[in-house]
Image: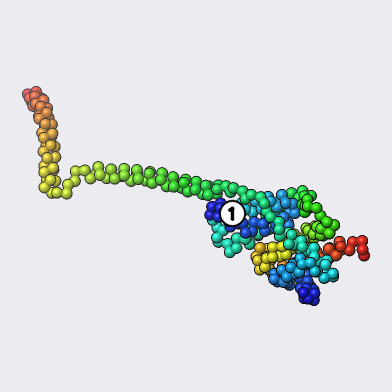
Amino acid sequence: MAYNKIEILVEKYFQGETSIAEEKELTNYFSSSDVAQHLEQYKPLFGYFSLAKEQKNTQEIPQFPKSRVKKSALAWFSVAASVVVLLGIGMYVYTNNDLVNENQKLGTYDDPQIAFRETQKALALLSGHVNTGIESVQLIQEYDNSKEKIFNQ
Amino acid sequence: MNQNEFVLLITPFRDKVFRLAKRLLISTEEAEDATQEVWVKLWNKNERLNGYGSVEAFAMTITKNYCLDQLKSKRAGIMSIAHSNFTDGAPSLQQKVEDRDSLDWVEKIINQLPEQQRLIIQMRDVEHYEFEEIAKVLEMNETAIRVALSRARKTIRESMTKTHNYGIQ
């Protein structure tokens, strides 16, 4: 190999202008057995870089905790729980309101025939009760009559 | 993404992250801790990882930031004591010992460089990243990286020449 070319490459290398390919070429050259005497000094440098690349990380990759995932899941659970509770309360209040409304609607009829009959029945009931009241009130009229007799003498 | 998919995702650059951490923190144990920390950070970003163009570049950025934080923290003083050498039980010839020694020297010299130059040397000369990728990880422009790289390489050359010629000149 032309020493000249290597020398140029080495110079470029120290200027920081070599490409990856050129650096590979240099590494190959310096790892070969015939290195020119005056370039011998760079041998350890490139030797070291190759050696440094051999280092391996032998430790085990740890078991990663899933805590993050769990945490967010828990957060969502609490959100879901609160939604359920709110819905429960909401539904309760809503249905209760409906009951009240239904109570207020009692006594209304869609069919006029039935409405008429029911009204008559209700009025008959009312007048019946009122009449029994009047009978006892007529007893009081007797007291009034006797009082008139006494005071008009 | 489950654990297995995550491990598959990080496998291609596992060692790169570790070596970058080791370059900055020097001690192997510290580098291992840092690497674990990086995986945890990545894992916590799990759902959003797909949003990043390159998970590898992202991981390298996390590593860089985490290690620099570590160095800035109080523990930095303790860490500089720990230093790993290339321990090798194999029988070594005189030449081999000398080679090892000069490789060791290179490491020592690199470890004396400023952190930024160490990062760049590690990413360029060891991991062979393109300048574009380094620029992304370090949040610098490419010219600045070239300049820093050239400076770092020249510093290494000078220190090596000094070491090799020690006592000769």
Mark yes or no: residue B34 visible.
Answer: no
The residue lying toward the viewer, choosing from A137 and B147, is B147
Position of residue B74 measured from the top left corner of the image (x, y, whole percent): 74, 49
Tell me: residue B23, above or below residue A90: below
Q: Residue at x 67, y 68 (%)?
A: B130
Q: Secondary structure at mark 1?
A: helix
Q: Write down the quadrant of residue A138 in the picture.
A: top left
Tell me: residue B140, above or below residue B37: below
Position of residue B156 measured from the top left corner of the image (x, y, whole percent): 80, 64
Q: Chain under label 1?
A: B
Q: Residue at x 55, y 61 (%)?
A: B51
The residue lying toward the viewer, choosing from B7 and B39, is B7
Mark yes or no: residue A108 visible.
Answer: yes
Q: Residues within 10 Å of mark 1 (few under 14, many from 20)?
A: some
Quadrant placement of the N terminus of chain A: bottom right
Q: Write down the quadrant of residue B16 in the picture.
A: bottom right
Q: Residue at x 69, y 69 (%)?
A: A20
Which kind of residue does numbered mark 1 sit on?
A: Val
Position of residue A123 measured from the top left corner of the image (x, y, whole percent): 12, 40
Tell me: residue B65, above or below residue B157: above
The residue carrying mark 1 is B7
The residue lying toward the viewer, choosing from A81 and A55, is A55
Quadrant placement of the C terminus of chain A: top left
Residue B24 is left or right of residue B166, and the answer is: left
